[in-house]
Amino acid sequence: MQTAYVRLVGWFAGWISASWITSLRKSYDTPVMINRTLTRRGLLKGGTLAAVGTILPSLEMRAETLMRPPSPATALPIRLGIASYTFRQFDADHLMAFAKQLKTPYLNLKDVHLKMGPVEQVAAQAAHYRAAGFTLTAAGNITFAKDSDEDMRPKFEYIKAAGIPVVVCAPTHENLPRLQKFARQYNVKIAIHDHGPEDKNFPSPYDVLKAVKNMDPCMGLCLDVGHATRAGADIVAAARDAGPRLFDIHVKDLADRNSKESQVAVGEGILPFREFFKTLIEMKYEGNVDLEYEVQADNPMPGVVESFAYMRGVLAGMGYK
């Protein structure tokens, strides 16, 4: 159980107070239903960005300033980003607006936000994100269900066109050798995503680590801490045991370690984030910690804001500014 002190720091750091969060949550008692075609002005009228804007500082600053990477002296030791599946009900422009509100430039893009297609179109989409100040850290989750060159090659051409270094994916045990071949050829890292007890291939991070143990160093793990917990894994030990094969992390929190439906904002559940972050820092983990908030798909920002505030607060409580 996390201490009351850590939880208090989580709410107050990251430029946000518990009372402001409460006010924000009350403003969302009636969810704002927003489809992908709404304009930014319509979104502001609906209250989502406006509400967030009242609790995050200096949002009147230019986007280039907001997205500028921090100096080495002030950078947090963990890169907090977004798994864009969080905003799967919204288009790319809304995703970028949300990320700027959250003051993170790091994106793990799902195909709803980086559409597969001709390589010229993929490259143009990726360039659009980068021109807006974003760093594309990973793509996926991408499913590799078949063991064939014809299925895999277009997906790797997609990754190459986007210029993305990490592929978060769901393969099978049978097609891992072929996946390794393509990863070597295209010079990318393969981060196999654990998906919990329902997944017949890789339910636990330890299933991934066992499968890639004797493979090329480009084959590794995307540790989803929620799914890993439901599969019975200790996420702190799993991160440490993965070591250099830990390429990406998807963060969520659970109220009940056995229930997928119990997901809550990070900090409201049972996962030991202070110890987890401390371990990542000790490991000198170089990948991303991407929030993947899977509930309230039509209205995710209240929980997303709480999650970012808590994670930044945990790091602040550990002495990082």
Image: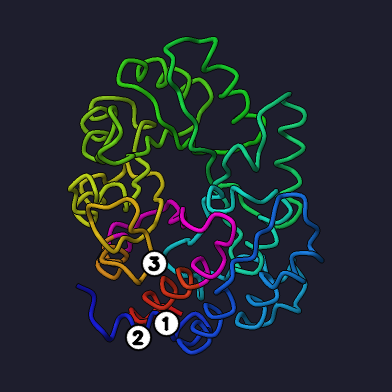
Give the image location of residue 216, x and y in percent: 33, 26
Q: Which residue is mark 3?
A: 266
**Residue 292 seen anywhere in this rendered image of the structure:** no
The answer to whether 192 is drawn above or below residue 128 in the figure is above
Category of crowding for the residue at label 1, using alpha-carbon neighbours closer than 10 angstroms: few (below 14), some (14–19), many (at least 20) = many
Q: Which residues are magenta?
A: 280-305
As helix, strand or loop, the secondary structure at mark 3 comes to loop
Residue name at image x 57 percent, y 24 percent: 155
Give the image location of residue 31, x and y in percent: 59, 66
Callouts 1 and 3 close, C-beta under 8 Å: no
Callouts 1 and 2 close, C-beta under 8 Å: yes
Residue name at image x 59 percent, y 47 percent: 88
Q: Amino acid at mark 2?
A: Leu
Q: CA distance from mark 1 to mark 2?
A: 5 Å
Q: CA distance from mark 1 to mark 3?
A: 11 Å
Between 66 and 175, the residue placed more toward the observer is 175
> Which label number is shown at residue 52?
none
Give the image location of residue 266, x and y in percent: 39, 67
The answer to whether 149 is drawn above or below residue 131 in the figure is above
Q: Which residue is mark 1?
A: 11
Q: Which residue is mark 2?
A: 8
Between 236 and 258, the residue placed more toward the observer is 258
As helix, strand or loop, the secondary structure at mark 1 comes to helix
